[in-house]
Amino acid sequence: MTAPRLKVLLVDDDASFRRVQEYQLSQAGYRVTVCADGNEALEAFRSGRHDLVVTDIRMPGIDGLELLTRLKAVSAETPVVVVTGHGSIETAVEAMKQGAFDFLTKPFPGDHLRLTLQRADEFRRLRREIRELRRVVEGRFAFENLIGSAPAMKGLFESMELVAPTSSIVLVNGETGTGKELVARAIHHHSPRSGRPFVTLNCGAIPASLMEAELFGHSKGAFTGAEQERKGKFEAADGGTLFLDEIGEVPLELQPKLLRVLESGSVDRLGEDEPVQVDVRIVAATHRDLEAMVQEGSFRQDLFYRLSVVPVVIPPLRERRQDIPLLAAHFLTRMARQTGRGGLEFDPATLDLLEAYHWPGNVRELENVIERMVVLSRSDRLAPEGVPSGIRSAGTSIVGAPFRLPPDGVDLEELEIDLIRQALARRNTLLYRMQKYRLR
């Protein structure tokens, strides 16, 4: 449905075309200003606000391409649709390079221009909303490199702001790809320890036989292969922050020694008798349910209580879908800088597909998808066709489509849980929009 009373500037030297399109657009709810040439159009555009522009290519005086360039110099955000009766691929490419939203060749179906303007207005509003979201995020809700304005993210930011200035141990819970290390780095950056080391250790990437030496260090000759003395991660982080990622992977037999370091602040190197005092702030992270691990006996209860002094939870991306356009825009801007392609932008239908997907890999998966789309796209506008097929199919309605039973069957309980989660995510998005626009 067209937004009410949008103002359109219609530029064409064909009086008959102007009359027909002015009537059809007016009937569709637009306020239309008509001009017969580029000079008149440029003056009208400068003197009054217009939401959308439709211009012919071949006109006396300033032609459509020159008008397009001048209009963009006045307002780069206003979508311009270029129309011509002498269409060619070269002309279309040139118009798109100069910033045209779309290129139409006369004659076209009666409602084609109206539908194109609808898409142009959706794109215009989307860009404005992303810009506003970015402004909000960079203001009140920004915290280091984290991006989001969903209610769950606001709670996360508030918790981080409260805990950062302290020395309390923080346990970050979140699914894979949600940005647990970013949260840890942000807490360190906003703490009194920001000028000291930030040291990381992925406990799930270190063999159990080597983890003790990695954490606590060793003396020369402490074990086979220990050819020289080496500091562990605790000593390396002295005065700063030690980020223990995937803390749930620490072997059960090593957990008492880790607990002792957390409580005493002293480290026992392998092969040495004298403990070494350290001043380290711990931020741990996990995607696992540590409480369940405690119940099953694979994680010590006392260590769990010591680590979870201040628990911080990062919501999965599917529970904050309203942040997807903002995150996608952030990653696209970064890719534009890296590739030198300053005109990169999303087709509105592409963002619809991204918002509809459930993102099991969370923000990391979204970032990888955006990079892939940019690398494989020949155009600066990322079209729906460039979205990976799995995401496209997930965003397509299954009503009326043939259902094929997977070879391993279907877990109806898991399917029901997933559908409920999707419904709740859409409800949260609706409530957020209603709150934003003060709708009852």
Image: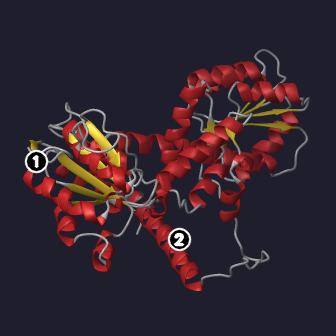
- Crowd class of label 1 (few under 14; some 14 to 19; many from 20; radius 10 Å): some
Q: Is residue 6 visible?
A: no
Q: Residue at x 28, y 74 (%)?
A: 294
Q: Is residue 206 left or right of residue 197?
A: right
Colour scheme of this structure image?
A: secondary structure
Please state the horizontal and vertical placement of residue 390, each as a whole percent of the image: 68, 59
Identify which residue, 294 or 136, lies in the foreground: 294
- Whichever of callouts 1 and 2 sits on the residue coming sooner in the sequence is 1
| Residue denoted by label 1 | 266
Q: Name the element at disc 1.
A: strand
Q: Nearer the viewer, mark 1 or mark 2?
A: 1
Could you say which quadrant of the image residue 229 lies in? top left
Q: Residue at x 41, y 62 (%)?
A: 432
Residue placed most toward the observer, 261 or 239: 261
Q: Secondary structure at mark 2?
A: helix
Say which quadrant the N terminus sits in: bottom right
Q: Is residue 93 left or right of residue 334?
A: right
Name the side, left or right, on which 50 lies relative to 218.
Answer: right
Residue 209 in the image, given as x and y percentages of width and height: 35, 54
According to the image, label 2 marks what residue? 422
Relative to 299, residue 119 above or below: above
Let me know if residue 3 appears in the view: yes
